[in-house]
Image (cartoon, helix red, strand yellow):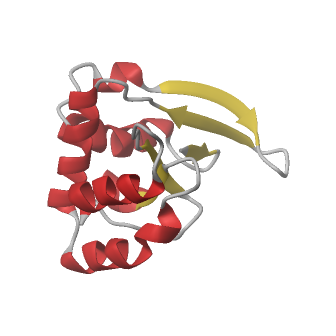
Amino acid sequence: MIAHATEDVSRVREALDLFLSGAGVREGSELIEELQAEGHHGNPITILSVQLKRKADCLNFARFVRERLSEEDVAKLREEMPERLDENQVFHLRFDKQAAYLQQVRLTNSSDAITAKIKIETYPKSREKAGAIVEELFG
């Protein structure tokens, strides 16, 4: 997620932390990495990222998101699931950054969002099986 120069980085961290604390990630805010970068027009930006590796944390994240989404967002997710699951079995979500700061979970199409990329592992690799897992988690 990107914090633009016009945004308070601590507030953006707080928005991201909603998902970590909601998922019960013990060391949530400590996992957030910050990288200073330069935007397309030379403006300073801060890139915030976190990677959940423990299966329990990932499942708790999915449950937290599913429980907090509106029925409208769930319907949208069901409709867009095939497009959101790429050829590498990564499921893509974008959450409204402002809503997250207000402790709400809402999907958005905006590029100024909290993005989540969820790698769905299947053995052997199968997009069909990955789709079934996504449906089970978020459908």
Q: Position of residue 84 (x, y in %)?
A: 49, 63
* In the rendered image, the vertical position of residue 56 relative to residue 133, given as above or below: above
**Residue 108 at least partly seen:** no
Q: Residue at x 62, y 36 (%)?
A: 46
129 on left or right of 112: left
Q: Residue at x 25, y 48 (%)?
A: 62
* In the rendered image, the vertical position of residue 127 relative to residue 49, given as above or below: below
Depth check, front residue: 122 or 31 = 122
* In the rendered image, the vertical position of residue 83 relative to residue 114, given as above or below: below
* In the rendered image, the vertical position of residue 138 relative to residue 13, given as above or below: below
Q: Residue at x 36, y 46 (%)?
A: 15
List the single residue furthest toward the right.
41
Q: Residue at x 73, y 33 (%)?
A: 37
44 on left or right of 23: right
Q: Position of residue 127 (x, y in %)?
A: 47, 55
Q: Position of residue 21 (x, y in %)?
A: 22, 35
Depth check, front residue: 23 or 86 = 86
Depth check, front residue: 95 or 132 = 132
Q: Position of residue 59 (x, y in %)?
A: 22, 39
List the single residue furthest toward the front.
124
